[in-house]
Image (cartoon, rainbow, N blue to C red):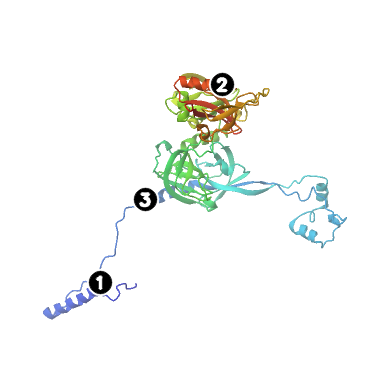
């Protein structure tokens, strides 16, 4: 060990020197050697707080977590079955055996090397009966939820696959089959048939999960195999714009490509969420990952295991959130509920009497927070369930009874479009108090916006030239004076805003505009 005392005697040297001097003194006085006891300094030892260890959790759950490899069918090359070769008046078979093209095809496969009957059949347009090759397309993670081999992963991991392989923690590779998948929640269930019992894990009660709780993510990042990261729950109820049922748990444990479908555990070894997406400007982990909550996953997985699909209740209305401006324009005390932009023709909602401009405030007495909340709650019911909706219309509450439809069978139906009426005269009129100029729409339904004052509230709220105003405060408008009449009535009713229904090539929406300008 290097001496760092820079010329000064060490503690050990001092102790030895003093011990020898003392021994000499005792011997001189008594003539009897004294018992020598060496004394050394203790090494430094700090009593640090005990750091948390996830080793027990990891060792318990790792055998239940697998890597998922997906293969899809690759279309075989045509092998020139639909082409004829002609080289200076010669066909392929007329070329000399040492011709570069013949050597190429002989080495890499082609017409040369196959039987004449094969070439003749293919020359007549016959099909190639060789099996399609399988090629790897994706890889992700998953975990067993039963001892007989059912496992969960993400839909986007297996979506385009034709063959599936799971790799266990000990390196064992087993074939799996797809039981069912659900694109709306990005979940899928696979099944491994093997004469063995699998280690499996349970879903947690995620209603008890709190922001700040520890979380352990186990998966297969970048195809490396079983890897573990840890962090805390950063937020709950995240909407990342992936669909109407967004309700993600946000975690800060490192999650990367290949972790998709892997579990996020609490310290009891229960699955609180399934890792499905990350926020990453660079493509790598930046500590913002999103997991499907266990409460959502457990219901979907159960349906997939039983029926191979998920059936959801369907209301059939286009909705948007209610902000404060919209709430003020409709006379609502709080910006809550789901604003109906348009009911789809023939849908359960339309049949029950739901109208555009209605605000759905409760379902079976349970208050609706926003549009996403309504979508999730409706989807939680099975088709043909009768529910009671509380609706705010024309400044008062109403109750409607609806028999929900089946989203799986109705999702592809679109509302019928009306034939356009005869073009209306193109007369422009400015509405200075609103900061817009309008003209009757060419199809006779509503008013086209031809100018927007860039300094107006209309511009600030996103109204653009080319869009069409079809109603104000749920009353149809066909000329500028119709808007003036509705706005004036709103002023008399003590409203400070009016609700404009606006259509564009991006769809329909509601915009609340102040009516006290000018």
Instruction: Judge left or right: residue 47 versus residue 501.
Output: left
Q: Which residue is outermost to the right?
A: 89
Q: How crowded is mark 1: few (under 14 residues within 10 Å), some or many (20 or more)?
A: few
Label number found at residue 52: 3
Element type at marker 2? helix
As displayed, is residue 134 above or below residue 42?
A: above
**Sequence order check, earlier mark of 3 and 1:** 1
Q: Which residue is drawn at 29% across and 73% down?
A: 5
Distance of label 3 from label 2 (alpha carbons): 68 Å
Q: Which residue is under mark 2?
A: 482
Position in image of residue 489 (x %, y %): 49, 19
Q: Residue 18 occupies which quadrant of the picture?
A: bottom left
Q: Which residue is under mark 1?
A: 11
As displayed, is residue 287 above or below residue 383?
A: below
As displayed, is residue 121 above or below residue 36?
A: above
| Nearer to the camera, 460 or 7 | 460
Check whether the beta carbons of the residues at disc 3 and disc 1 lie within 8 A of each other.
Answer: no
Report if residue 199 is visible in the image.
no
Q: Which residue is drawn at 62% across and 42% down?
A: 160
In front of the other: label 3 or label 2? 2
**Sequence order check, earlier mark of 1 and 2:** 1
Q: Residues within 10 Å of mark 3 (few under 14, many from 20)?
A: few
Q: Which residue is drawn at 61% across and 27% down?
A: 428
């Amino acid at each position: 060990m290097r001496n760092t005392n820079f010329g000064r005697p060490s503690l050990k040297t001092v102790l030895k020197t003093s011990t020898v001097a003392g021994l000499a003194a005792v011997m001189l006085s008594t003539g009897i050697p004294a018992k020598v006891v060496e004394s050394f300094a203790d090494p430094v030892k700090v009593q640090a707080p005990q750091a948390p260890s996830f080793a027990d959790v990891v060792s318990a759950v790792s055998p239940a977590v697998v890597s998922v490899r997906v293969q899809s069918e690759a279309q075989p090359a045509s092998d020139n079955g639909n082409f004829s070769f002609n080289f200076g008046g010669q066909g392929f078979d007329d070329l000399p055996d040492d011709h570069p093209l013949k050597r190429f095809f002989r080495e890499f496969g082609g017409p040369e090397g196959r039987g004449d009957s094969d070439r003749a059949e293919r020359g007549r347009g016959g099909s190639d009966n060789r099996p399609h090759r399988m090629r790897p397309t994706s890889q992700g993670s998953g975990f067993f939820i039963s001892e007989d081999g059912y496992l969960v992963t993400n839909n986007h991991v297996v979506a385009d696959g034709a063959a599936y392989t799971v790799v266990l923690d000990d390196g064992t590779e087993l074939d799996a089959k797809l039981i069912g998948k659900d694109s709306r929640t990005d979940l899928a269930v696979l099944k491994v048939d093997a004469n063995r019992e699998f280690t499996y894990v349970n879903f947690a009660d995620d209603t008890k999960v709190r922001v700040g709780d520890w979380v352990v993510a186990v998966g297969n990042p970048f195809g490396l195999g079983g890897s573990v990261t840890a962090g805390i729950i950063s937020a709950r109820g995240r909407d990342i714009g992936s669909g109407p049922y967004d309700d993600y748990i946000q975690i800060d444990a490192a999650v990367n490509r290949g972790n998709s479908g892997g579990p996020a555990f609490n310290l009891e070894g229960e699955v609180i969420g399934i890792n499905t997406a990350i926020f990453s400007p660079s493509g790598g982990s930046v500590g913002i990952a999103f997991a499907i909550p266990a409460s959502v996953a457990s219901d979907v997985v159960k349906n997939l295991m039983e029926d191979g699909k998920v059936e959801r209740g369907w209301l059939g209305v286009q909705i948007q959130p209610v902000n404060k401006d919209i709430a003020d324009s409709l006379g609502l005390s709080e910006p809550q509920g789901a604003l109906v932009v348009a009911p789809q023709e023939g849908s359960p909602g339309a049949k029950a009497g739901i109208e555009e401009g209605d605000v759905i405030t409760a379902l079976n007495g349970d208050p609706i927070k926003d549009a996403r909340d309504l979508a999730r709650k409706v989807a939680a019911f099975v088709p043909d369930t009768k529910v009671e909706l509380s609706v705010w219309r024309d400044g008062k509450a109403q109750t409607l009874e609806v028999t929900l439809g089946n989203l799986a069978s109705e999702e592809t139906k679109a509302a019928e479009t009306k034939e356009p009426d005869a073009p209306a005269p193109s007369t422009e009129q400015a509405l200075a108090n609103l900061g817009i100029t309008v003209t009757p729409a060419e199809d006779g339904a509503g008013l086209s916006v031809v100018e927007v004052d860039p300094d107006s509230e209309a511009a600030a709220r996103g109204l653009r030239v080319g869009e069409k105003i079809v109603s104000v405060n749920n009353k149809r408008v066909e000329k500028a004076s119709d808007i003036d009449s509705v706005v004036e009535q709103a002023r008399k009713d003590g409203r400070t805003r009016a609700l404009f229904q606006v259509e564009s090539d991006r769809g329909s929406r509601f915009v609340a505009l102040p009516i006290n300008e000018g």
